[in-house]
Image: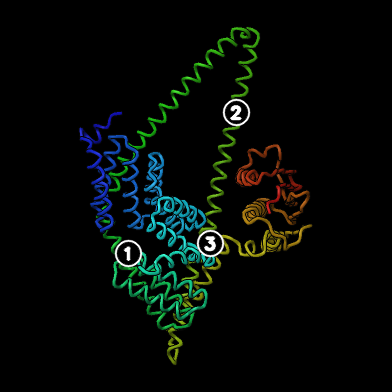
Amino acid sequence: MNFICVFGQEKIPSQEELKKLSYEAGKNYEDGFLEKSLIQARKLLSFAILSKNYSIAAEAYNTIAANFDELEESEKAFFYYNKSLYFAEKSNNERLKKLVYNNLGNIYCFDKKQYKKGILYYEKSLNISLKQKDNYQVNFTKLNITWAYFDIGDYKSGYPYLKAINNYYTTKKEPSIYVALNMLNGMYCSYSEENDKARQYFQEAIKAGLQGSEKTDLCFAYEEYSKFLNKIEDYKNAYSNLNAYKKLDEELRSEEKLKKIKIAGIDLELDEYKRELEKIDKLYKTKQQLFKAEQNRNKKIVSVVILLFVIIVILFYFLYQNARLRQKNKLKDIQRNIQLNIINASIDGQELERKKIASFLHDNVSAMLSSAGLHLNAYSSQTDTESEEIAKTKAILENAHDSVRDLSHELLPALLVRFGLLFSVEDLCERNSNSTLHFEFSSNVSLKKRYNERFEIRVYFIISELLNNIVKHSTAQNAKVILNEINDRLIVTVYDNGNGFDAKKLDSVEGFGLNRIRARIKKLRGTFAIKSIENEGTTVVIKVPISH
């Protein structure tokens, strides 16, 4: 493979020189010289390409990922960490694997909010550290696991890890985790209602953070201390610490912006090295596949020649016709499956985005508006009279909160989440009924019956799509939705007395969302049947296995 056009005739350094370059790139990252670190890591990656050395590639990718992690570019960091892990596993670099597992755990937990998967990566890192008796990394990873559990309010699962760290650092302290450790102790004491101890831990965390260089941990300490003070109704100090958190957070964001400006061009250059290294790996895999394919092909040729010698005259025509038929059927199946997969991917993406946006509006924006109202109330309680501006601000906040809540419920109906499929479909029928069209709902299942959340969401949107078609296209006066449970299957029947259509031309009907409905039902492993007569109405019957 020829790399001269990209790298020229550059001489590959010795192993000692490469180790030194890798160390310098890591040291510059730790000292905050991210531009230097990225340039050195990029150079290290070029040598990995020239020498086809997986271990060097793993080290270079890890340093690149760590730099992007520091710049809060989590998606880029996630990509390069996975690249590093891939080559670390190929070169059996256990030291690097434990670091990458830990860092991937951070991204899954605190950026992607996939805590279960993140904690699994932490555990992988912890197992390697325990085998290597790396006490610093053991405690560092346990700290991250504790933080992850506390972040989701699972203090009981996180406490054993916190206790183990406290026991290890009884007689000594580790500066790099001291601020975070005190903050986590404060959070646990707040949870266990030990308010005096919680206050001491939070104050010690902030004191150490102000004296040291762990600005990010200090920022989190301000935020958690503010939450604790708000909980015990010390609103004045809660507000003060919240302001300190916001000020430091803004300072950190400004520093990140400056760092990003400096390294803006380097990221583009990294793509070239990334592509070249991928070519090396693909070339190796291609050669292996070609070798195996050649062996298999030779065996098949011998077998086919012997077989054809005996039966070619008798079966030639039959095999030819049969092969053509199979090919046609296979092509149709592939086309059908591709279309369904595209539709399903689109549907899954929409459902996921609906859920994400609704969750973000409810858990973040709504929470922030509530927090703003709380602070405003705290401020108002300190004054004898409430100004007109304060009253208007409260009203604006309340309207904004209501709007966010309504939008969240529209994306993911609150009735569906709280009360389940049966209750929400009955409500859907009532909401779609008007003076010209009446929807009736009936079921042999209790309205309180609940199924699997994903199952309920998919069935709800299928029924919603069918009702929407009736409203838009049927000109019906009466319609009925029936939900019955028979032999562990949910039978959905939707009927209307509208204008109907020619069922023989069903495949050519456009604009009714039938392909999307079929795709949703196939995803549920169900069946879908339509019976329609022009000017008499339409009946749709859906049968899906129940997912509890």
Question: Which amino acid, mark 3?
Answer: Ala
First in sequence, mark 3 or 2: give its number: 2
Depth check: give the residue in front, 301 or 434.
301
Dot 2 crowding, Cα within 10 Å, few <14, some 14–19, many 20+: few
* Residue linked to disc 2: 330
- In percent of width and height, residue 546 lies at 70, 50
Q: How far is the residue under mark 2 from the one under mark 1?
A: 55 Å
Question: Is 81 placed above or below 395 here?
Answer: above
Question: Which amino acid, mark 1?
Answer: Arg
Is there CB contact under 8 Å for labels 1 and 3?
no
Dot 3 crowding, Cα within 10 Å, few <14, some 14–19, many 20+: many
Q: Residue 253's mark?
A: 1
* Residue linked to disc 3: 358
Q: How is the image coloured?
A: rainbow
Is there CB contact under 8 Å for labels 2 and 1?
no
Q: How far is the residue under mark 1 from the one under mark 3?
A: 27 Å
First in sequence, mark 2 or 1: give its number: 1
